[in-house]
Image: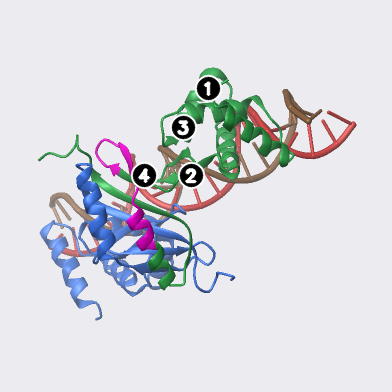
Chain colours: A green, B blue, C brown, D red
Amino acid sequence: MSHEVEMKALASYLEQNNLKHTKQRELILSAFLEAKRHITSEDLYQAVRQQHPNIGYTTVYRTMKLLVEAGLATERRFDDGITRYEVEQEHHDHLVCIKCGRIQEFECEMIEKTQNEIAERHEFLVLRHRHELYGHCRDCRED
Amino acid sequence: MSHEVEMKALASYLEQNNLKHTKQRELILSAFLEAKRHITSEDLYQAVRQQHPNIGYTTVYRTMKLLVEAGLATERRFDDGITRYEVEQEHHDHLVCIKCGRIQEFECEMIEKTQNEIAERHEFLVLRHRHELYGHCRDCRED
DNA sequence: TTCGGTGCAAAAGATTTGCATATGT
DNA sequence: ACATATGCAAATCTTTTGCACCGAA
């Protein structure tokens, strides 16, 4: 089976918390890992439904929360108000095209460092951050 | 009357767009300007209701959209999914305390410049951005 | 008089919750 | 056997829309 590492991580998280290892949880994790980045609950639901037609939205929502708890997924909410999930990983930020919806990622040490300095100046303890640039991507800008 | 400048701006926007100058619009703008920053539609509704008890949510929502159009307000959505409004002004970003909900602002030339360089590198045209640090504010951090 | 505006109630869209049933352990 | 999960439907929460009536120009 693919995604062995993550499957083991899930199993171990479930075990440690006296939770149950179910087909649904396995399928949802698998679909999530398979998916292209920034997948919505709706899309996950559709994906899982192909393998397991009578799964409920509810289970997808609940399972994604669980995966976030388990450290396997991260929740993101861009300006359209829909929650998306992506694989937990190093800090990075987003370029969101408001025409075609394409989401690109970027990373910048310098900005990270600067923002931490600013937080310190305010005696603010940063737990997470979001930094998103909204506009037109290469293919959508007209000039 | 206070907020003369903004009231005039509203009047002129309404006139130029063949829209009507109503008591409700005036009251909502006034409550918005009076309010502390980052006010929600709900709070605005409650505030306006004190002067005009039978105002509807609908009017508040519609009017805030109009004020955004008119350039008098800016819409912000933090991670709780609720839309907040603030006075249109220079770029600035936010420190959001996830314990007490306090929202502070910061501004950084350096970060602005850097993010524009990154966008350029991706051939991305930035129309707006959001940069938010979530964590514990001075009063809520325990150390 | 004529459009645009308002307020209500109902709809919408995303997410959560209550509950009876099903299923891991 | 027992506690947790699941799936459905109903509830929530924020925001939007349809519509009859109201009011500014």
Q: Are marks 2 and 3 in contact (CB under 8 Å)?
A: no
Residue annotated with mark 1: A49
Q: Chain of mark 1?
A: A
- Say whether residue A108 is magenta: yes
User: For numbered disc 1, what is the local secondary structure?
Assistant: helix
Which quarter shows the N terminus of chain A?
Answer: top right
- Marks 2, 3: nearer the viewer: 2
The quadrant in which residue A103 appears is: top left
User: Which dot marks residue B117?
Assistant: none
Distance from the alpha carbon under mark 2 to that under mark 4? 14 Å
Q: Which amino acid does the dot numbered 4 rest on? A: Asp
**In the picture, residue A139 is in which quadrant?**
top left
- Whole-percent x, y for residue C25 in the image: 78, 30
Q: Looking at the rendering, in which quadrant would you find the C terminus of chain A? A: top left
| Chain label for disc 3 | A
Q: Which residues are magenta?
A: A96-115
Q: CA distance from mark 2 to mark 3?
A: 14 Å
Q: Position of residue A12 (x, y in %)?
A: 68, 36
Gap between marks 4 and 1 measured at Cα: 24 Å
Q: Chain of mark 4?
A: A
SS class, disc 4: loop
Q: Are marks 3 and 4 on the same chain?
A: yes
- In the rendered image, residues at marks 2 and 1 fall on the same chain: yes
Q: Are marks 2 and 4 on the same chain?
A: yes
Residue linked to disc 4: A80
Which tag, 1 or 3, sits closer to the chain's start?
3
